[in-house]
Amino acid sequence: MIQGVIFDLDGVLVSTDELHYAAWKRLADREGIYFDRTINDRLRGVSRMASLEIILERAARAYSEDEKQEMAAFKNGLYVDLLDGLTPEDILPGVTETLDGLAARGVKAAVGSSSKNAKKILEKTGLLDRFDAVADGTDITRSKPDPEVFLCAAKKLGVEPALCAVVEDAEAGIEAAKAGDMTAFAVGDARKSPRADRRLNDIRELLALWN
Ligand code: B16
Ligand code: MG
């Protein structure tokens, strides 16, 4: 039986995906690079620098390493400013009830996010105290689809990976969960992933596992 649930952050707990999109769009427009929401879906769960490389696939010229660092910093500055506006109202529907339900069933909960801004997001939304452990972009060297962040979360929870479930909105995250020998629950965009073990229309459906 599953003893620990590891939640992705962006697109699962909080809709920061819209803020990532707005910040990347500003950068792409500044550089005259085509960028749309379909390309943005490929950035879900992917690290900042890997996201930039995906955006640069449409660029008309090559960029130097220094230019790439500047672009990533520019985007992150915009994104961090947007995070200042986050409140508990930005928690996605069903998340609070799901966390309450897990706690009532004695199931541990963690965050497993590629973001280096995860703690700020959890603080601004009041979610930080709701988790037994947080593993994020500051804990890892390899981003999803590598399982490192989920294995780190499982270790912090003290639960064997095989007894952990992951809830993800990104293909890269589903792949990471499976590479880590965990059960992968897909929400949102990740429901089209063939590798997901289960697909949820509503995150609260997760609680049926323990009924
Ligand atoms: P940062 P997740 C991911 O968060 C986002 O989905 C992805 O779009 C972003 O590039 C990545 O975090 C890194 O974020 O630039 O804030 O360090 O879905 O793994 O919670
Ligand atoms: Mg995500």
Image (spheres, rainbow, N blue to C red):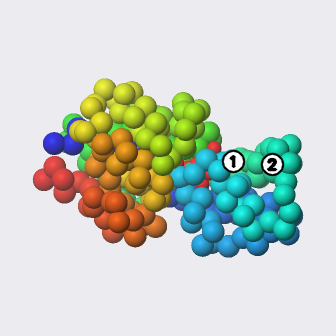
User: Is 106 above or below relative to 93?
Assistant: above
Query: Is residue 111 at least partly visible in the picture?
Result: no
Quadrant in the picture for the N terminus: top left
Picture quadrant where residue 203 is located: bottom left
Residue type of the residue flagged with mark 1: Met
Tag 1 residue: 49
For residue 31, side relative to residue 133 (left or right):
right
For residue 184, side relative to residue 207 (left or right):
right
Q: Nearer the viewer, residue 101 or 57?
A: 57
Residue, far front? 62
For mark 2, give the secondary structure: helix
- Whether residues under marks 2 and 1 lie with C-beta atoms below 8 angstroms apart, the answer is yes
For mark 1, give the secondary structure: helix
Q: Position of residue 118 (x, y in %)?
A: 57, 41
Q: Residues within 10 Å of mark 2 (few under 14, many from 20)?
A: some
Q: Report how far apart the C-alphas of labels 2 and 1 lie in the structure.
A: 8 Å
Instruction: Name which of mark 2 and mark 1 comes first in the sequence.
Output: 1
Residue, far left? 211
Q: Nearer the viewer, residue 50 or 97?
A: 50
User: Is 83 above or below relative to 191?
Assistant: above
Q: Position of residue 41 (x, y in %)?
A: 57, 66
Q: Nearer the viewer, residue 76 or 67?
A: 67
Q: Which residue shows up at 86% across the image and 43% down it?
A: 66
Query: Is residue 137 at least partly visible in the picture?
Result: yes
Q: Which residue shows up at 68% across the image and 73% down it?
A: 36
Q: Position of residue 14 (x, y in %)?
A: 51, 54
Tag 2 residue: 68
Q: Residues within 10 Å of mark 1 (few under 14, many from 20)?
A: some
Q: Position of residue 8 (x, y in %)?
A: 45, 49
Q: Which residue shows up at 60% across the image and 73% down it?
A: 38
For residue 182, side relative to residue 35 (left or right):
left
Residue type of the residue flagged with mark 2: Lys
